Amino acid sequence: MRLDIYLHERIDADMSRNSIQDLIKDGCVRVDGREVKCHYKMKENDVIIAEVPQVKEIDVSPEDIPLDIVFEDDFLLVVNKPAGMIVHPASGVYSGTLVNAVLAHARNLSSVGGRFKPGIVHRLDKDTSGLLLVAKSDPVHLGLAEQFKKHTIYRRYIAVVKGIVQLDEGEIDMPIGRHPRERTRMAINLGAGRQALTIYRVLKRFNGFTLIEVYPKTGRTHQIRVHMAYLGNPVLGDSLYGTKDKLISRQALHALEIGFQHPLTKENLKFSSSLPADMQVLIADYRIK
């Protein structure tokens, strides 16, 4: 068994596998007195010493934050998340998140994701706006998660990317994994990455920019941003995979539509949102007409 998997199953703490991997990379885990890699394969009689920092118990509290609710029934919510809002508490941020807002709105949320992610079936990056599903019960959460796993969830994004995308439409089928040196970044990783497929179509070409619609068929972290950067057309304003831009203060990426089968009623549902004001202004700006 891999060392990171072994520790994740045995450390009695609310730690994700990524957190365990960070401990190993930081030298907090030693096998027979020496530092090893996350993928180290366990051997009989190995002596493992892991220094796990004590985690202060944090409560995630309901907060009266306005929500743009596109759809709601007794089982789930479809929320239009604004750019700049973090989806769930993490990395020292425990307030002002979508979870804090949803906790104040709904009495019951699914517990599948743990106490920091109640109801959260999938995520959007902080500076990506658009539609997000929130489950109110565990069966609904698991039903939606299964649809994501089978890639049957319909998702349509709108993005403005730098440069002129040459093909009118295309697909990017390149595996994505954690960047080997920078932990906040993902990267194309042919050896250890997970399969990732993105389909795109050009809507309009401007002077030095391209407006596209994007259909991610898998759900890897930063998938659209990594794939478009790989294509040579990073999302405009994406400082992590491209550069900041004075035309917009965040990455010009919006989750415009989402479609799925309701886990309980079995009804096929599809919802749309409006393009946020900053992207509307960007597209209409005289500099990129």
Image (spheres, helix red, strand yellow):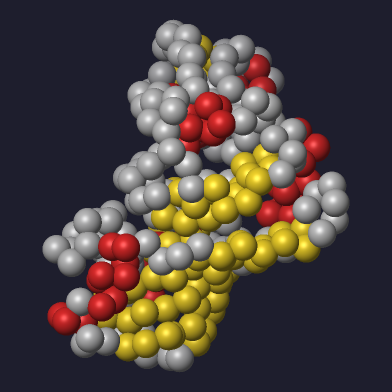
Q: Nearer the viewer, residue 154 or 180?
A: 154
Q: Which one is nearer the viewer's eye here, 184 or 41? A: 184
Q: Is residue 198 above or below residue 49?
A: below
* Side of 4 relative to 58 (left or right): right
In this picture, residue 74 sits left or right of residue 257: right
Q: Residue at x 62, y 62 (%)?
A: 271
| Residue 94 in the image: above or below residue 98 | above
Residue at horizontal 20%, vertical 77%?
Answer: 285
**Residue 284 at x, y percent in the picture:** 25, 78
Residue 190 pos. (x, y %): 51, 62
In screen coordinates, is 260 left or right of 69? right
Residue under the image location 50 percent in, 73 percent down: 214
Q: Is residue 6 visible in this depiction of the protein?
A: no
Q: How many marks?
A: 0
- Front position in the image: 15 or 175: 15
- Taking depth in this image into account, of 151 and 110 the one nearest to the observer is 110
Residue 137 is drawn in which quadrant?
top right
The correct choice, above or below, for 26 with respect to 72 in the image is above
Q: Quadrant of residue 2?
A: top right
Q: Residue at x 28, y 62 (%)?
A: 278
Q: Return the x and y of residue 265 as percentages of the image width and height.
A: 85, 51
From the viewer's perspective, tell me whether residue 141 is left or right of residue 155.
Answer: right
For the question of whether residue 57 can be seen, the reply is yes
The image quadrant where one finds the C terminus is bottom left
| Farthest right residue in view | 265
